[in-house]
């Protein structure tokens, strides 16, 4: 429609916005399926459409989504640079939910980049994300695609950052609280978030709890077609292998094999 039809400038802008929003969804699906090259191509297509439509908030979402993929795929430096660019692209006037989301992605990118200095930057970005979301009010109008951004999701990211930074005393209670309130029908998300809880238990020297949680992850992810979930299961089992002499862990590893 955009390439082959005639329309007003206003309609053309709306078509570009729809292309960008669809690209974010398709990119996310491709990324979760493990098709990272295709996901990157689609994300960049959407980023170009959003930029052409002069929608900085939407462009920030596309750039941040790609940054998140890069950070999780061993391209941490690129991911960090792009996450920071997404935050800058959105600007200070972006809706509070959008700034909170972009700051969350910056925090994750800093975490994956590693190093004590980056860890401090990550924690600072998490604090700023919470402050941004607190500015959301009933009179604030956010794009519809930000429907899922709330305090619970920010807490999930915060607890994942603490897990990656090997701070289980912070991560475990936070994850337990969030997961206790989470919609259990979202099997993929539950499996992912529980995988971080299992690792945090292992870091806290609680292998029995880690094994029990890991068993739930494997059970939930059995019917979920997600490359991301499969990756997390491998990470979790590798971490638990350090406690292979513990009977509960030994049984889990044998079952997984």
Image (cartoon, helix red, strand yellow):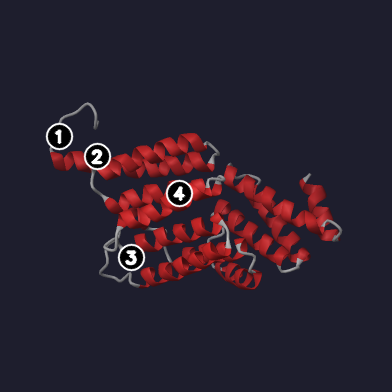
Q: CA distance from mark 4 to mark 1?
A: 33 Å
Tell me which label, 2 or 4, sits earlier in the chain: 2
SS at badge 1 = loop
Image quadrant in which the C terminus is located: top right
Q: Are marks 2 and 4 in contact (CB under 8 Å)?
A: no
Image quadrant in which the N terminus is located: top left
Residue located 46% across and 44% down the image: 28
Q: Are marks 3 and 2 in contact (CB under 8 Å)?
A: no
Residue located 49% across and 35% down the image: 37
Q: Which label was assigned to residue 15?
A: 2
Q: Dot 4, crowdedness within 10 Å: few (<14), some or many (≥20)?
A: many
Tell me which label, 4 or 3, sits earlier in the chain: 4
Nearer to me, 175 or 90: 90
Q: CA distance from mark 3 to mark 2?
A: 25 Å
Nearer to me, 82 or 168: 82
Q: Is residue 185 visible?
A: no
Q: CA distance from mark 2 to mark 4?
A: 24 Å
Tell me which label, 1 or 2, sits earlier in the chain: 1
Q: Which residue is mark 1?
A: 7
Q: Which residue is mark 4?
A: 67
Q: Which label was assigned to residue 96?
A: 3
Tell me which label, 3 or 2, sits earlier in the chain: 2
At which x and y percent is residue 166? 64, 65
Q: CA distance from mark 1 to mark 2?
A: 10 Å
Of marks 2 and 4, the one in the foreground: 4
Left or right: where 257 falls relative to 150: right
At which x and y percent is residue 69? 50, 46
Tell me which label, 1 or 3, sits earlier in the chain: 1
At which x and y percent is residue 207? 77, 64
């Amino acid at each position: 429609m955009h390439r082959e039809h005639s329309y007003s400038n206003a309609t053309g802008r709306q078509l570009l916005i729809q292309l960008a929003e669809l690209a974010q969804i398709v990119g996310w699906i491709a990324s979760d399926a493990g098709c990272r090259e295709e996901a990157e191509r689609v994300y960049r297509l959407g980023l170009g459409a959003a930029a052409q439509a002069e929608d900085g908030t939407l462009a920030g979402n596309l750039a941040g989504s790609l940054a998140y993929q890069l950070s999780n795929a061993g391209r941490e430096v690129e991911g960090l640079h792009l996450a920071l660019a997404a935050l800058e692209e959105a600007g200070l006037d972006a809706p509070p939910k959008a700034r909170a989301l972009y700051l969350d992605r910056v925090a994750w990118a800093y975490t994956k980049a590693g190093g004590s200095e980056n860890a401090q930057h990550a924690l600072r970005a998490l604090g700023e994300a919470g402050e941004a979301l607190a500015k959301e009010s009933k009179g604030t109008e956010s794009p519809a695609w930000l429907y899922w951004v709330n305090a619970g999701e920010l807490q999930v990211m915060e607890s994942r950052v603490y897990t990656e930074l090997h701070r289980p005393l912070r991560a475990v209670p936070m994850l337990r609280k969030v997961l206790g309130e989470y919609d259990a029908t979202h099997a993929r998300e539950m499996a992912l978030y529980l995988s971080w809880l299992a690792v945090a238990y292992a870091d806290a020297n609680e292998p029995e709890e880690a094994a029990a949680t890991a068993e739930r992850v494997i059970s939930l992810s059995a019917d979920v077609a997600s490359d991301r979930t499969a990756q997390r299961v491998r990470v979790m089992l590798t971490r638990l292998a350090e406690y292979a002499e513990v009977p509960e862990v030994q049984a889990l590893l044998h079952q997984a094999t």
